[in-house]
Amino acid sequence: MNRFEKGDRVRIDIPDKGDLDHEKYHGECGRVVLAMNDDADSETGDPRDEVIYRVELDSGGQMDFRWRDLRPE
């Protein structure tokens, strides 16, 4: 199970080429700058979905991702 903390280095891994974010973010690296809780886990039944990770990308800017789109760098 991928759990990340503020400061962790991560790689964006979106293998589904049909995902709208694949071309823009797949393979990018960055650092987790914030972990926010929400209630998506109540919809999916997966407790890992309760966290959204804000990643500061090495290429500039920030983007929010779920655990399934992140891997340790």
Image (cartoon, rainbow, N blue to C red):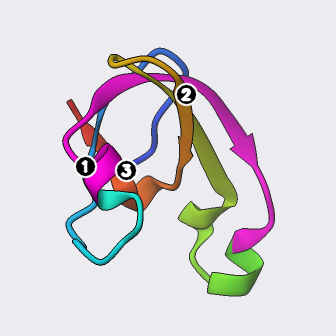
* Res. 9 visible in picture: no
Q: Is residue 26 magenta?
A: yes
Query: The disc labelled 2 sits on which kind of residue?
Result: Gln
Write down the region rendered in magenta: 23-40
Q: Residue at x 20, y 66 (%)?
A: 15
Q: Is residue 56 above or below residue 70?
A: above
Task: State the separation of the CA atoms marked 1 and 3.
Answer: 17 Å
The residue singled out by tag 1 in the image is 26
Q: Give the mark, 1 or 3, whose residue is nearer the N terminus.
A: 3
Quadrant in which the N terminus appears: bottom left
Residue 63 in the figure: left or right of residue 17: right
The residue singled out by tag 3 in the image is 2
Q: Is residue 66 magenta?
A: no
Judged by depth in the image, the label closer to the viewer, 2 or 3, is 2
Q: Residue at x 19, y 41 (%)?
A: 27
Q: Give the mark, 2 or 1, whose residue is nearer the N terminus.
A: 1
Q: In x, y percent, where is residue 3?
A: 45, 44
Quadrant in which the C terminus appears: top left
Disc number placed over residue 62 in the picture, else none: 2
Query: The disc labelled 1 sits on which kind of residue?
Result: His
Callout 2 crowding tier (Cα within 10 Å): few <14, some 14–19, many ≥20: some
Name the element at disc 1.
loop
Give 36 or 20, whichever is nearer the viewer: 20
